[in-house]
Image: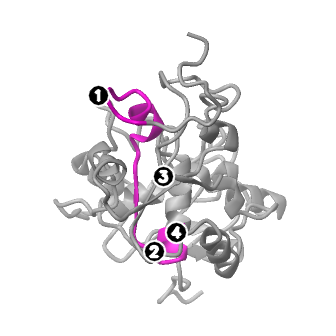
Amino acid sequence: MSFGAVAQEGPLVTAAWVEENLSNPDVRIFEVSVDTGVYERGHIPGAVNLAWHTDLVDPIRRDIVSRENFEALLQAAGVGEDTTVVLYGDNNNWFAAWGAWVFDIHGLGEVKLLDGGRKLWEAQGLPLDTATPEYAASAIELPEQPADLRARLVDVLDVVEGGADVSLVDIRGPKEYSGEIFAPEGVQELSIRAGHIPGAVNFPWGGAVNEDGTFKSADDLKAAFAALGIDGSKPIITYCRIGERSSHTWFVLSRILGYEVRNYDGSWTEYGNAVGVPIDNPSGTVWGKI
C-alpha cells in the first residue's frame, strides 16, 4: 500500500477509511470510551487507549490534562507533527468528542472522529484486537498557549447578567433542563440546584446522531439548530452537567458546521452550585427534596 496524503476532507473519517489505514504509520488511532474497560476486551488494531478520567484530566485539580502531561502522552504514542489523529469511542463517540476538544485546546485542531464510533465498527464486524500497541516515541511539542475553545463561569455570567451577545446551548435531557431531575438516572447528583442557565436553549446531544451512531448530515444538523435560533451568526457556548456531553455538541457546531463555539466544562455542576447566580427552573424544584 502506498501512503501519502491520508486524511479525508472534513472532521470525520469512515470505518472503511480507518480499516484501509490500519497499518499506515502516519495515522494514529485513539479510543476514548465511557466504559473504560471496553478497550481491553477488544479495540481497533493499533489503537491507543485514553482513559478519560485519568489520561485527559488533571489528577489534582478539576481541570483538563496539562500541556506537559498531554505532550508526554502524545510523544509516547508516537504522534508527530504530521500524524493524522483519529479518535473513536462507545456511546456514539460521547467521550471521543470530549477527547477531540482536549486535543484541539492543546493545538491539534485537525483531529478527526471515526463516524459511527465503536458502535458502527462492531456492527460491521470489523477487526478487533486485544494487544496493547507500542510505538517509537516522537518529539512533538505542543503550543504553550491553549486554543480559545473553553468557556468559564465568568464568560457565562457575561451572557446572563452582562448582556453579551452569545447563544447558550444546554444539551442535557429535557427533564434536566426543566429542573424536574438533577441528573440522568444512575448518575450521581452533583449540584445543589436544578434547572438551567437563563436564556439557554435545549438541544439534547443525542439528537445529532443516527441510529447507527453516525452523525446526521450537515444540512439536517444546521436545520435542527436553526429551528432553535442557533445559526452561527453569533458565538455559542455549550454546556451540560460536567462538560462531556456538551463537547459532543461542540464538535457538531464547531467542527461539522463551522460555527464559533466554546465548551463550558464547568457546566451545571459549577453553575448550579455557584452562589449568587440566577437560574431558570420551570419545574419549580430548585432545591429538590431539601
Front one among 224 and 11? 224
Query: In this rendering, is residue 130 above or below 236?
Result: above
Q: State left or right for residue 214 relative to residue 202.
A: right
The C terminus is located in which quarter?
A: top right
Mark 1–mark 2 Cα distance, whole angstroms, equals 33 Å
Mark 1–mark 3 Cα distance, whole angstroms, equals 33 Å
Question: Residue 199, which numbered label?
Answer: 3
Query: In this rendering, is residue 182 above or below 82?
Result: above
Question: Looking at the image, is mark 1 or mark 2 nearer the viewer?
Answer: 2
Residue where numbered disc 1 is placed: 60
Tell whether label 4 touches label 3 (CB within 8 Å).
Answer: no
Q: Which of the two discs, 1 and 3, labels the residue nearer the N terminus?
A: 1
Query: In this rendering, is residue 238 above or below 65?
Result: below
Q: Quadrant of residue 23?
A: bottom right
The residue at 47%/43% (across/down) is 197
Question: Residue 259, which numbered label?
Answer: 2
Question: Residue 17, which numbered label?
Answer: none
The residue at 56%/84% (across/down) is 8
Q: Residues within 10 Å of mark 1 (few under 14, many from 20)?
A: few
Under tag 3, what secondary structure? loop
